[in-house]
Amino acid sequence: MRVRSVPVLDEVVRDDEAVVLVGGQVLRVSPLAHSLRTLAADWTGLEELAARLAERHGDPGGDVVELLRAVVADLQGAGLVETGE
Amino acid sequence: MESPQVTGDPPVEVAGEAEAAVVPLHVLDTDVDVVVSGPGATEFARTVAQRWHLAVAELAGGADGAAAGAEGSGSEASKGEVASVEVELGGTAQGPPDGVLRGTDERAVLQRLTQEVTRTAIRARTGDLLMLHAGALAHPATGAAVVLVAPGGTGKSTACRVLGPERAYLTDETVGIRRDGTIAPYLKPISTRRPDWGGVKDEVAPSELGLVAPTVPVRPAGIVLLRREDGREGAPEVTPLDTLEALTALAPESSGFMNTERPLTWLAELLEATGGAVRVTYGGAEDLVPLVDEICGRLS
């Protein structure tokens, strides 16, 4: 699976977090999700993304790729990322 | 069409032979004509003009001009078309909605008129103004304004009524902030709910409550999210909000937000220029005096 950030209408970033305007909604984006969106500005493989996020935020333990898959699903549901094969 | 000016104060224009009258309002940098027809139109129009006396066009120009500053950004924004709201007295709502307010109960029609004028002005100014569901009062000399954000029916009008007489009144409903940082007044009547009127609000002329329009340019000096708790006693609890917290709290209390260019960035800049927003939990409007004094005491 590959992941890419979806452009938003407006974004305010303070420290490591953001608030974005997307799909008619104002959403708060956590530090992890903000990093994910930043690292996936272009299509990025899930394994590479997991490694880079673990580097930045620490290794959560367990199957990092599977954990990330769940995070990506949430962000996709919120309209913040898109996925492809 | 003949539109002779009826003598007396406030101004009402009588239109044509059938009973009809026009009250020209200037609200949120928008000209809105209230066009009244039907039996008793002239008298009803006089009532509208009396309740909306600070917003009658030829009078409201002074307040807007002051609030817009020497550059006159307010008048620039008001050069568009004149919007109108139609009221047909004695009529009954039949058939598909056509945008005309009909009715016979004066209080109910006045309340619906306020709602329709608000909708019309917001529609006209979407994209031009950053609009928050808020009341606002300002220091009469410096123009430093406190913006009191709250959902409908949770304290804005009461706060304006209680805290307004020593300050300049801007609105109890919608605060419109221009790109230059000044506030476009919305000098509407104060909407007051009375328990014996089955939920119909009374639209009270600001002058009856000792409220006056600003005479100097007005800018936000602080933004307060009101959280009223009935029965609460003691000092209010004031909680500072960081920029991101404030954005997520304020966005739902905005109008036209999604159709405004980069509204989050605009609001964040406003928040950070005014020291950020606070959430205040309080029991009665009088408890807000120290906070409102502090904000209106800031140099604008």
Image (cartoon, coloured by chain):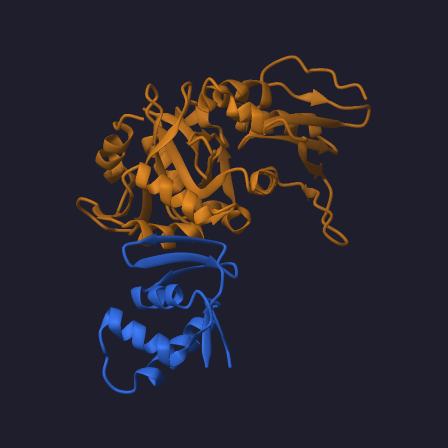
- Which residue is at a point 22% across and 74% down the rendered structure image? A58
Q: Where A7 falls versus B181 (above or below)?
A: below
Residue A34, horizontal then vertical, whole percent: 35, 64
Q: Among the chains, which one is orange?
A: B
Relative horizontal placement of residue B275, taking residue B187 as reference (left or right): left
Farthest residue toward the top? B7
- Which residue is at a point 27% across and 33% down the rendered structure image? B295
Q: Nearer the viewer, residue B145 or B260?
A: B260
Q: Where A12 falls versus B31 (above or below)?
A: below
The answer to whether residue B47 is seen in the rendering is: no
Farthest residue toward the left? B234
Q: Quadrant of residue B115?
A: top right
Farthest residue toward the bottom? A63
Residue B45, horizontal then vertical, whole percent: 64, 27
| Chain A, chosen colour in render | blue
Q: Nearer the viewer, residue B263 or B195?
A: B263
| Quarter of the figure that contains the N terminus of chain B | top right
Residue B149, horizontal then vertical, whole percent: 38, 44
Residue B61, horizontal then vertical, whole percent: 54, 20
Q: Quadrant of residue B216?
A: top left
